[in-house]
C-alpha cells in the first residue's frame, strides 16, 4: 500500500496548449512522453464499492495492465491524499484474488463486481524537479464513458513523487496565474459514477460555518451536477477570512456576486477566468 498526494485542475480543451506552453517555459520541467490509457472501473450493481468510498480499476497502457484500488481519502490544502494499492496484471482481466488482503474483502461481495464505467484518455507527462521535490505533471484529454453516454475529460494533475509537498501548491498556483483552471475536488471515479447514475451527491444546505475545504468541495459538486451554489455570509465567514489572509479579497467578492446572481458553477468557471487562482489561494490556508 502507498499514499498518493495530488492536486487536480480541470482545464478547458481550448486552453491545453497554454498548459503545454507554461511547461515548456519551465527549465525544470522534463517532457517524459505520451501514452493512451483505457481505464475500466468495477463495482457491484448496488454500487457497494462506491459506498465504501473506494474505487477499483484496471488500467491498460499498451500491452501493460495494472489493477488499482484507491480510497477516497481526504483533502489537505487543496491536495488529495488517499491510500492506494497497485498490482501488475498478466492481462486486462480483473483479478479478485489480489483483493483478498485489502479492506474490501470483508465488506463487498467480490463475485458481483462488474464494469460500470470507463475513463479513456491521452496522457502527456512531465517531471519537475525543484526545491527538493519531484513532481509528476500530467495533462489528460479524453472522455468518461458509461453505456451510450459520455462527457469530456480535460485535466492537469500535479502528483508528489518525492520531497517537499509544498511544491505541489506552488506549481499549481503558478499555472493558475497563467491559465484559467478550476480546482476540482471531484475525482475521475466520482465523475464516472455520476454519469452511470450510481452516485448522486447531496448538496449541503449549510446552517453552520463551512470550512474552506467544505466550500471548495461544494463548488466541485456544483460543477459535477451543473447547479448553482449559495450560502449565507455567516456560513462563509471562514472562507472570507482566508481570502483576506491570502490577499485575494477582490476575487472573492467577485465570486460572491456571481454566485448571488444564480449562475451555475460551470457558468462561473466560464465567466471567472481567475477562479482557479482564487480557489488555490484559499486552499493554501485550509
Image (cartoon, helix red, strand yellow):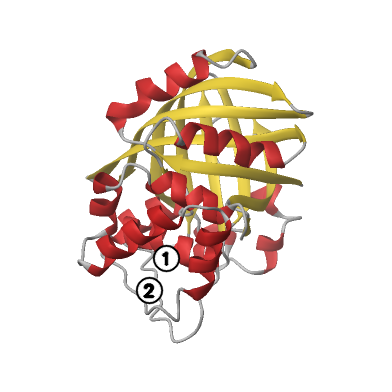
The x, y position of residue 184, in whole percent, is 45, 50
Residue 218: which numbered mark, if any? 1
The x and y percentages for residue 41 are 47, 47
**Quadrant occupied by the C terminus:** bottom right
| 253 up-or-down from 20: above or below | below
Q: Nearer the viewer, residue 2 or 230?
A: 230
- Horizontally, residue 149 falls left or right of residue 55, namely left
Residue where numbered disc 2 is placed: 203
At x 54%, y 19%, the residue is 63
Q: Residue at x 50, y 63 (%)?
A: 50
Question: Can residue 86 be seen from the camera position used here?
Answer: yes
Query: Which mark identifies residue 144?
Result: none
Q: Do the residues bearing badges 2 and 1 touch, measured as CB atoms within 8 Å?
A: yes
Q: Which of pointers 2 and 1 lies earlier in the amino acid sequence?
A: 2
Tag 1 secondary structure: helix
Closer to the camera, 279 or 149? Answer: 279
* Label 2 secondary element: loop
Locate residue 266, reporting x and y percent: 27, 52
Q: Nearer the viewer, residue 141 or 247?
A: 247
In the image, residue 87 sits, relative to residue 254, either above or below, namely above
Q: Position of residue 13 (x, y in %)?
A: 30, 30
For the point 27% across and 43% down, the residue is 151
> In this picture, is 98 found above or below 133?
below
**Residue 90 visible, this orientation:** no
Compute the Cα span from label 2 to label 1. 7 Å
Q: Quadrant of residue 241?
A: bottom right
Amino acid at each position: 500500500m502507498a499514499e498518493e498526494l495530488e492536486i487536480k485542475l480541470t482545464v478547458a480543451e481550448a486552453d491545453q496548449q497554454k498548459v503545454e506552453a507554461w511547461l515548456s517555459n519551465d527549465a525544470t520541467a522534463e517532457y517524459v512522453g505520451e501514452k493512451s490509457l483505457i481505464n475500466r472501473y468495477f463495482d457491484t450493481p448496488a454500487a457497494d464499492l462506491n459506498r465504501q468510498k473506494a474505487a477499483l480499476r484496471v488500467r491498460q497502457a499498451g500491452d501493460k495492465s495494472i489493477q488499482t484500488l484507491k480510497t477516497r481519502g481526504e483533502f489537505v490544502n487543496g491536495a488529495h491524499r488517499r491510500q492506494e494499492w497497485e498490482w501488475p496484471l498478466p492481462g486486462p482481466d480483473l483479478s479478485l484474488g489480489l483483493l483478498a488482503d485489502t479492506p474490501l474483502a470483508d465488506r463487498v461481495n467480490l463475485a458481483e463486481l462488474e464494469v460500470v464505467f470507463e475513463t479513456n484518455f491521452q496522457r502527456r507527462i512531465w517531471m519537475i524537479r525543484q526545491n527538493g521535490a519531484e513532481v509528476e505533471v500530467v495533462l489528460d484529454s479524453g472522455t468518461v464513458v458509461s453505456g451510450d453516454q459520455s462527457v469530456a475529460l480535460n485535466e492537469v494533475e500535479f502528483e508528489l513523487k518525492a520531497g517537499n509537498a509544498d511544491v505541489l501548491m506552488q506549481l499549481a498556483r503558478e499555472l493558475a496565474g497563467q491559465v484559467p483552471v478550476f480546482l476540482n475536488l471531484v475525482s475521475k471515479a466520482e465523475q464516472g459514477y455520476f454519469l452511470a447514475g450510481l452516485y448522486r451527491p447531496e448538496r449541503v444546505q449549510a446552517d453552520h460555518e463551512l470550512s474552506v475545504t467544505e466550500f471548495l468541495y461544494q463548488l466541485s459538486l456544483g460543477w459535477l451536477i451543473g447547479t448553482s451554489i449559495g450560502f449565507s455570509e455567516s456560513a462563509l465567514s471562514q472562507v472570507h477570512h482566508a481570502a483576506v489572509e491570502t490577499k485575494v479579497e477582490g476575487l472573492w467578492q467577485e465570486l460572491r456576486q456571481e454566485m448571488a446572481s444564480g449562475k451555475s458553477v460551470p457558468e462561473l468557471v466560464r465567466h471567472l477566468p481567475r477562479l482557479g487562482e482564487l480557489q488555490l489561494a484559499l486552499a493554501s490556508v485550509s
